[in-house]
Amino acid sequence: MEGFNTFEKQYKVLMGMSGGVDSSVAVRILQEQGFAVQGAVIRFSPAHDGAVSAAQESAKTLQIPLHIIDARDAFEQHVILPFCESYCAGMTPNPCILCNPLVKFRLLAEKANELGCQFIATGHYARVEVDHKGVSRIAVPQSTARDQSYMLYRLPQEILSKLILPLGEFEKDDIREMARDIHLACADAPDSMEICFIPDGDYAAYIRSRGFSPKTGRFIGPQGEDLGPHAGVDHYTVGQRKGLGIAAGRPLFVKAILENGDIQLAETGQEYSTHITLCDLTTPDGQPLPAGDYLVKIRSAAKPSPCLYDGAGAVRFPDPVRAPAPGQSAVFYRDGLVFGGGIIAETD
C-alpha cells in the first residue's frame, strides 16, 4: 500500500460510514494498516434510514463496532433550510459543501473525542498533505475521475490535522475489487448521483413540500424579448439547456436568474464568463487567501482553469469558463493542494 503511513496498533480511528462501497473498503484498508477501527453512521434525515441499515451490514461483515449519530436537527438547520432558501433566491447551492464542515465532520470529530479515537476517516477520494509550513491541506487523489477534493475545501485545520483519507491512492475499480474479495454486500452497488436527502432528484417538489414559495417570473430572450412565464426559479440553474419548456426556434440556455424572478436566456456561445466575484472565502489555515495565480474549479466536476485572484474576492479567467453559477463554490489549487475557496456571488 505505497503512499500510506503505518501507525502503531494502539492508534484508533473512527470511520464515517455510509453503507456504500467506498467507506466500507476504507475500513479494511485502515485495518490492514494496523489501526483499531470503529465506525459511525450519521442519520441526517429520514431519507438516510437505508444508509444506516447498509452501514450496519458492512460493519458486521468487517467485524467493527458501529455508532449511530443522530444529526437530524443540525442537518435541518445547517443544510436543508439554507439549501431551500438559496434555491428560492435563484442560486445553485451545493449541500455537501455546507454539510461537511458544519455537520458531518464536526460530529465525527466530536464522537471520536468521546470514544478516545485519535483520528477520523471517510471514504472520500482525496488526500491530506502537510505543507512546508505545517499546514494540513486537502490534496487531489490519484484518481482524477473520482476527485472529491472540491467538496472538502471548507474543512478547518482542527479537522484536517486528524483526518485520514485512505482512498486517495486508489482508483474506483480497485475499491470494488477489494470489496468483492472481502464479500461486502455493497461491492457492486451503484454510486449515488443525487442529493442524499432528495433521492428522487426532484428538487422543486421537495422545496415546495417544505412550505417554500420560490419566485416566479418571465423568460427574457437574448434581445430582451418576453418569452412567457416560467415555472419558478427552483426549476432552473445557470447553464441549463434542457427542460425550459419554451419554443424559441433556436437553442437557448439559462444565462442568469435575476433578483426579480425573471430568467435571462442566451444563445450558444454566450454562456462563458471571464470574471466572477466570491463571498464567504475560507482557507485551511484560516488566513486570507493571497492574491496571485491559481487553478480554480467552479463546480465539482469541472476541470481546473487558470485564474488570477486579486486577494479581495475577484477572480479573472484568461480563458473564459462555462456558466459559473451563483451559489456554487470556486476552489483554488496550487501544485495539487487546496488553498481555499468561496461561494460564487456574481458573474460577468
Image (cartoon, grey):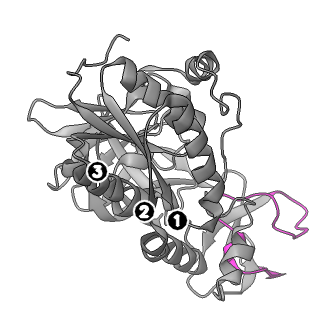
Is disc 1 surrounded by few (<14), some (14 to 19) or many (20+) residues within 10 Å? many
Per the image, label 3 sits on a secondary structure element best described as: strand
Which quarter of the picture shows residue 191?
A: top right
Q: Magenta span has 235? A: yes
> Is residue 48 shown left or right of residue 98?
right
- The earlier-in-sequence mark between 2 and 3 is 2
The answer to whether the residues at label 2 and label 1 have Cβ atoms under 8 Å apart is yes
Q: The residue under label 2 is which amino acid type?
A: Leu
Q: Position of residue 101 (x, y in %)?
A: 34, 58
Which residue is label 3 attached to?
309
Is disc 2 surrounded by few (<14), some (14 to 19) or many (20+) residues within 10 Å? many
Per the image, label 2 sits on a secondary structure element best described as: helix
Question: Does 294 appear above or below 40?
Answer: above
Q: Where is residue 220 in the image (x, y as percent from the top left)?
A: 73, 77
Q: The residue under label 3 is which amino acid type?
A: Tyr
> Is residue 148 shown left or right of residue 269?
left
* CA–CA distance in space, label 2 to label 3: 23 Å
Q: Residue at x 76, y 57 (%)?
A: 241
* CA–CA distance in space, label 2 to label 1: 9 Å
- The foreground one among 269 and 324 is 324
> Is residue 318 shown left or right of residue 290?
right
Which residue is label 1 attached to?
93
Furthest residue to the top?
2
Magenta highlight: main SS: loop
Which residue is label 2 attached to?
98
Q: Which residue is drawn at 40% across and 56% down?
A: 104
- The earlier-in-sequence mark between 2 and 1 is 1
Q: Of tags 2 and 3, which is closer to the observer?
A: 2
- The earlier-in-sequence mark between 1 and 3 is 1
